[in-house]
Image: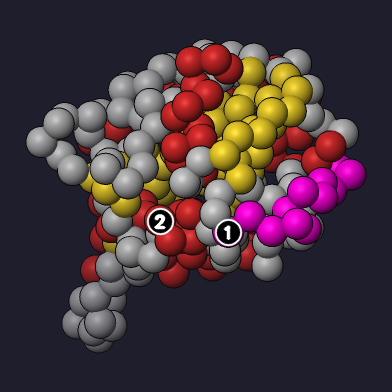
Amino acid sequence: MKNILVPVGLSENSINNSLLQYAVDLAKELGGTVYAVEVFKELPRSGSLPSVNETLKEISTSSIEEKLSALDKKGVEVIPLPLEGELLEAIPQFNLEHAIDLIVLGSESSDLNNPYFLGETSGSLVKKTEIPVLIIPSQHKFTPIKTVLMAVKSGVVKKKNALTPIKEILTTFGAELKLLQVKTADFLPEDSEFQKELGEIVSTYKSSENATLFQGVLEHLNETHPDLICVFRRKRGFFSKLWEENTVLKKDFESRLPLLVLRGAD
């Protein structure tokens, strides 16, 4: 994961720089580069104001650089990246040209009065992007990843290279992967089959029966003590239902640990 992209200003977590600092700390371990992104909207072209849009880009760049000035970059290359247009369109376009390996997003504030785990734009990115997404809880500080809890309903992973991010994390940190298979009411016989590539990186396996994947994760958190939770976003099952709406409510899902969301199936 050499290219890590962080949208600036989507949550309190990113506004106060804790998200960027987490991304920098992670990039240092992975040997990656961080792109700090902020979007700006170009004005219609005007013959009398030919430099207005270039000025808007410069203002956006300055805004990002101001945020970066407070970071401890630890030798990591952090690039201010002003992108034109809407974030949901600008990131895929940039990805085509620069091959982004990971998007790092912040969850909404842990304030009890805020009902959302992910806001409109963050939730839309998780729902629509082809890029793996790492969601960092508010004010969470980076620590080395030693244990990963991967929660699945099916052991079948059809998406090519879907496991690449988690394999790189396991290798970089010397971490172990504890696999939890949650059997829900719609569990199918073929879900018991495990792709060889997945089986090769698993340290321990356990299954449980729960109404949802989320309930299974909650039931086993204290037993596992993970540093990272990993899930797949598939077309079938709990996470597909979770992101039917762009926002994600805390009552439906909330993680106090970093959450890595991988694409599991086409």
Magenta stretch containing residue 193, yes or no? yes
Q: Amino acid at mark 1?
A: Asp
Residue in the image at 33% along x and 61% along y: 246
Secondary structure beneath dot 2 equals helix
Q: Position of residue 57 (x, y in %)?
A: 33, 58
- Disc 1 packing (10 Å; few <14; some 14–19; many ≥20): few
Q: Tell me where the magenta segment starts and ends, as one range.
A: 186-197
Judge from the rendering whether residue 143 lies leftward or rightward of residue 206; answer left or right. left
Q: Find disc 1 in the rendering and name its residue.
A: 186
Does 55 appear above or below 251?
Answer: below
Q: Position of residue 230 (x, y in %)?
A: 58, 36
Closer to the N terminus: mark 2 or mark 1? 1
Secondary structure beneath dot 1 equals loop
Q: Quadrant of residue 250?
A: top left
Q: Which mark is residue 242?
A: 2
The residue closer to the viewer here, 93 or 119, is 119
Residue in the image at 65% along x and 39% along y: 181
Judge from the rendering whether residue 169 lies leftward or rightward of residue 121; answer left or right. right
Which residue reaches farthest bottom? 47
Residue in the image at 72% along x and 20% along y: 176
Res 156 seen here: yes
The residue closer to the viewer here, 39 or 60, is 39
Q: Position of residue 258 (x, y in %)?
A: 47, 29
